[in-house]
Amino acid sequence: MILSVRDLKVSFRTDDGLVRAIDGVSFDLAESEILGVVGESGSGKTVSLLAVMGLITDPNAVIEGSIRYKGRELVGLPPRELRRLRGNEIAMIFQDPMTALTPVYTIGWQIAEQIRAHRNISKSKAMERVEELLAEVNFPNPHEAMSRYPHQLSGGMRQRAVIAMALSCNPALLVADEPTTALDVTVQAGILDLVRKLRATHKSAVVFITHDMGVVSELADRVMVMYAGRIVERGSRTALFSDPRHPYTRALLGSIPPLTGAKPRRLPAIPGSPPSLLRLPQGCAFGPRCPVRYEPCLTGKPDLGAATHAAACYRVAQA
Amino acid sequence: MTDKDRPILETRSLGKRFSIGTRFSAEGRRTVHAVDNVSLTVRRGETVGLVGESGCGKSTLARCLVRLYEISDGELLFEGDDITSKSLSELRPLRRRLQMVFQDPSASLNPRRRVGDLVAEPLRIHGKLSSREIASRVAELFDLVGLLPDHVMRYPHEFSGGQRQRVGIARAIALNPDLVVLDEPVSALDVSVQAQIVNLLADLQEKLDLTYVFIAHDLSVVRQVSTRIAVMYLGSIVEDGPAEEVFSTPAHPYSQALISAVPVVETTPSGTRRRIILTGDVPSPLDPPSGCRFHPRCPIAAERCRTERPEVREFRPGRKVACHFPTV
Ligand SMILES: Nc1ncnc2c1ncn2[C@@H]1O[C@H](COP(=O)(O)OP(=O)(O)OP(=O)(O)O)[C@@H](O)[C@H]1O
Ligand SMILES: Nc1ncnc2c1ncn2[C@@H]1O[C@H](COP(=O)(O)OP(=O)(O)OP(=O)(O)O)[C@@H](O)[C@H]1O
Ligand code: SF4
Ligand code: SF4
Ligand SMILES: [Mg+2]
Ligand SMILES: [Mg+2]
């Protein structure tokens, strides 16, 4: 296993009380594996992976549990050690490209610095590499693009610059947080190919957060569905899409607008909104919005269990 | 002409140029033609979906449409009135009627202000309402977009992405606009929240008689919301027509490639859909290819395409394409 996360819990102390962002998440990731992570917005996808990267800087955060990278415990590792791992072996593509880019420097300079921070090469060599990388992420005119400032690029170009930065070190573990949301489908297809290539040539493991089910079904080997800080369903891509079990997963798949055939007048959205993480409901967190809730759901919290294809739901356990 | 057919917004050969670099940089000052020769008509009550490759000029065009950018070339007409070079003070009365929802709600909402305040802001600036009237209008708007009354006192970071997006929409519709330009309003949302917002936009359109220009990369969302589709490539519109028709029978080779590349959840055995993979370099608006700008990547490009730029022409009532050899 390249990555083993056990019973990860992340909470934030706020004026209103404790926000339980991650409430017991466990998963494994093998070499050359691509794990897709989907789920409600606010369900903890970003926070759980920031925790893995040791990038939660909020002093009010409380992190519990275990995160092992190649057998080595990361929770409690000194920041300096973590920084060495990041960029060398582990890379992250942030959801918002502007968190990784500085407005005052050109993107060429920023990517070159990132390369030079971890590898001892000359400035001109680094610049050559930057040009190659920008070409790989489909920049028109990569040489010219190096001298642009972030605000002179379109949203999707900024995102691709950040992808180039993350790929620059051929990471053993790549964590990508919605890397293709600002990209059109053709450019997106190119980026997905790059991720596959990274896996093929460097045996890299990839965690890919996205809300695009089409992307998940094309790229991921396994999928994890999150709701209110927990994993509610986990399984191979084929199992999850052909036989979704958790009521939330089913509803999520049902909300996708069709690309062909008749256009529904309204999309089948899930009624209600996700629970406040300050006051999680008693029992199953999806309960208040669940169409098949029954007695046991009101008091107990359903477990995910250990099966390869597992759903944290009493109805599923019973079936 | 009935009210429905009357254009609310019209561009005539609209263009937007940026200059980049300085005279000291290696290549000197250069011009990016981000939007080039766009003629688009938006009729009252319709939703025009704007799609195209990343960097093709959608956001730039969107900002030109609401005059957040100065327009470099061509004309922009609002209800037949030329507003291309109106000054900021002349635009003031129009601002109320032309609104924009930005792609990233968190970047466009001041984090230190309560969301009730943020929604009240346009009312204070443009309206002549008492503070009591403003409060009741804010409550009404919150209800309309599906936010709870006690959300008024919260700060933006205390909301989920979908709720923040609703705040952005509440702000945009606060002054009863006629036209709202939405730049990727649902791209950052999971599909269930996305479905809620898409339904909300449809309800508001019906209730308030709104017209939308809707930008998104997710083509299934675009298909759901749009009555018409305009496909952009390298700064220009290459195809324009009723949404259903453009999706089922795209005429331009670029539209065909775009629609075929959509990743879908495969419930049918794979291999039933043929994907057109575009080869060749993505061209740059700094030095666009000669002739048809798509020719270096077009699977059916012919000699003529390299030299002669195809004009936009209407090949059937309501359907336009800029291609020498469209599939019609
Ligand atoms: N610093 C913080 N203080 C308090 N709450 C926080 C903080 N950071 C995150 N949260 C909360 O933790 C929860 C999980 O957030 P996270 O960003 O992981 O969601 P997500 O699943 O990535 O959602 P999205 O799809 O919208 O990106 C959210 O409800 C968020 O409001
Ligand atoms: N301020 C600016 N200065 C220089 N060039 C710019 C500026 N803003 C945009 N551009 C360029 O104009 C072109 C169009 O950008 P725009 O942001 O409109 O694209 P877009 O279609 O919205 O792309 P995306 O889908 O990635 O958001 C791009 O080549 C971009 O680099
Ligand atoms: S445990 Fe009960 S409430 Fe929760 S998802 Fe299953 S059926 Fe619904
Ligand atoms: S004009 Fe020629 S190159 Fe351009 S899209 Fe049509 S066939 Fe292709
Ligand atoms: Mg996130
Ligand atoms: Mg854009």
Image (cartoon, helix red, strand yellow):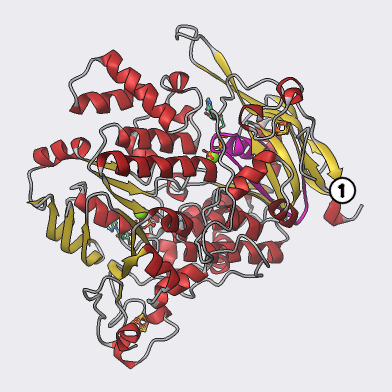
Is residue B174 visible in this depiction of the protein? Answer: no
Image coordinates for residue B274, horizontal then vertical, percent: 59, 51
Q: Quadrant of residue A304?
A: bottom left
Q: Which residue was labeled with disc 1?
A: B317
Image coordinates for residue A286, horizontal then vertical, percent: 36, 77
Q: Mark 1 falls on what kind of element?
A: loop
Q: Residues within 10 Å of mark 1 (few under 14, many from 20)?
A: few
Label count reads 1
Confirm if mark 1 falls within 8 A of ligand 4: no
Q: For the point 34% across and 88% down, which residue is it?
A: A319
Magenta span includes B18: no
Magenta span includes B57: yes
In the image, taking residue B279 as reference, residue B6 lies left or right, namely right
In the image, taking residue B312 as reference, residue A30 lies left or right, namely left
In the image, taking residue A308 as reference, residue B90 lies left or right, namely right
Q: Quadrant of residue B73?
A: top right
Q: Is residue B249 above or below residue A18?
A: above
Q: Is residue A89 above or below residue B148?
A: above
Name the one closer to the observer, A132 or A111.
Answer: A132
Q: Quadrant of the N terminus of chain A?
A: bottom left
Q: For the point 77% across and 29% down, which residue is it?
A: B310
Q: Identify which amino acid the numbered label 1 is placed on.
A: Pro
Q: Which residues are magenta?
A: B41-65
Is residue B204 visible in this depiction of the protein? Answer: yes
The quadrant of the picture showing ligand 3 is bottom left
Chain letter for mark 1 = B
Name the one closer to the observer, A225 or B14.
Answer: A225
Q: Is residue B136 above or below residue B71?
A: below
Image coordinates for residue A63, horizontal then vertical, percent: 15, 58
Image coordinates for residue A108, horizontal then vertical, percent: 36, 23
In the image, taking residue B118 as reference, residue B250 lies left or right, namely right
